[in-house]
Amino acid sequence: MRLSHQELREVLVFCRPLRTVAAIVGAAAAATTFATPASAAAAPLTEAAGPAALAAAQHTLGSALGSTFGLSWLDTTTGGLVVGTTDAARSAQIRAAGATPKVVRHSASELKNVQSTLDRRAAGVPASVAGWYVDAPANEVVVSVVGGDPAGVAWATAGGAPVRVERVAHAPRPLWDAVGGQGLYFSGGACSVGFTAFNDDDVHFVITAGHCTNIGGAVSGVGGPIGKVAKSSFPDNDYGTVKVTSDAVSTPPRVDRYEAGTDVRIDGTDVVPVGGRICRSGITTHWQCGRVIALDQAVNYGNGNLVYGLTQTDACAEPGDSGGSFVSRPTAGSGTKLVQAQGMTSGGSGDCEDGGDTFFQPVQEVLDRYGLTLETN
């Protein structure tokens, strides 16, 4: 009997030794097993999944990949999660988890060892070395050297560890925020930060009370030097500005609530009417609240010092609080609290033990007078 080619192939297959058939069946089963998770692969992991989901996925994949894990990062173009591995065979596992695999040369532990080697040599680091870090997408340890200084380059490469030297233009410096209600120090006294603003040339200023800026000269804050007094108006008005000249100072639109909670953020300058709730912040008595009693009040501070257009409140204040922020009372509840900037503490009577009245200089007047734009959320 002559067999067709198809029949002959089937006979040959079924006549193979049992172990061969078992191997074929096992391979088919493995293929079936592999196909199942592939067809039910997790949805692509992107930045939209949120920090918690991404962190969980990174931890899970990092543990699963073990010594072959090569760190993970978000693709800045697609927002997708990319996971590095030193073993190309692990790519399917990474894809099944919803991430994009990338085969890399160095594992996470190898890169960490290089970084640790630099850490141990930090005692002799030149000032021109701005820092070092692991560049996850590039799969390298980077040493930043200001201006490519030869001494810095020599230090970076002396340990024999594979690094990439990156030339940077400037050395880092500590940064600190000039926040409403925190300390503002003059050569002859202490006041408080009111608000921060900027002009058309993007020069930034701290706004405070005029009887504080009348002292003149250099001004510092809680983190160090800020700059010098730029403008001052007292009496008649009670406002002044400090030009921010230190590049270590940032000017966020925030007011410190001290023990009362997290900072509030400035959202505008809508005026709270008489009877409305307001709060103020300053270095002496911190966060105090009350209500508006009167608008556009003339106040006589004595010795010919009359100030016009102030707002009267029953929120207490004491010396040192001058210049500090007056804002609308934040709404109850959790989350970021937005407030309206009202003005800067000018003066008052009484104290925060027995109570008293406090006056503030409305902020809009100084903004209009000096052509400034308030920093807002």
Image (tube, rainbow, N blue to C red):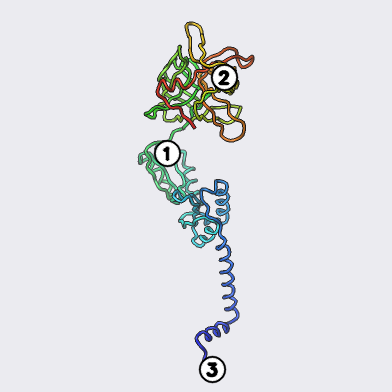
Classify mark 3: helix, strand or loop: loop
First of labels 3, 1 by sequence position:
3
- The residue that appears at 46% across and 22% down in the rendered structure is 364
Crowd around label 2: few <14 · some 14–19 · many ≥20 (10 Å): some
- The residue that appears at 38% across and 28% down in the rendered structure is 200
Rendered location of residue 140, percent (x, y): 44, 50
Given the image, on which type of amino acid does mark 2 rest? Val
Rendered location of residue 139, percent (x, y): 45, 51
Residue 299 against residue 330 in the figure, above or below: above
User: In whole angstroms, how far apart are the C-alphas of marks 2 and 1?
Assistant: 54 Å
Is residue 225 or residue 192 the one in the foreground? Answer: 192
Crowd around label 1: few <14 · some 14–19 · many ≥20 (10 Å): many
Residue 340 against residue 140 in the figure, above or below: above
Residue 155, image quadrant: top left
Crowd around label 3: few <14 · some 14–19 · many ≥20 (10 Å): few
Residue for badge 3: 1
Given the image, on which type of amino acid does mark 3 rest? Met
- Mark 3 or 2: in front is 2
Residue for badge 1: 130
Residue for badge 2: 274
First of labels 3, 2 by sequence position:
3
Given the image, on which type of amino acid does mark 1 rest? Ala
Rendered location of residue 357, percent (x, y): 58, 14
Q: Residue furthest right?
A: 354
Classify mark 1: helix, strand or loop: strand
* Image mark count: 3
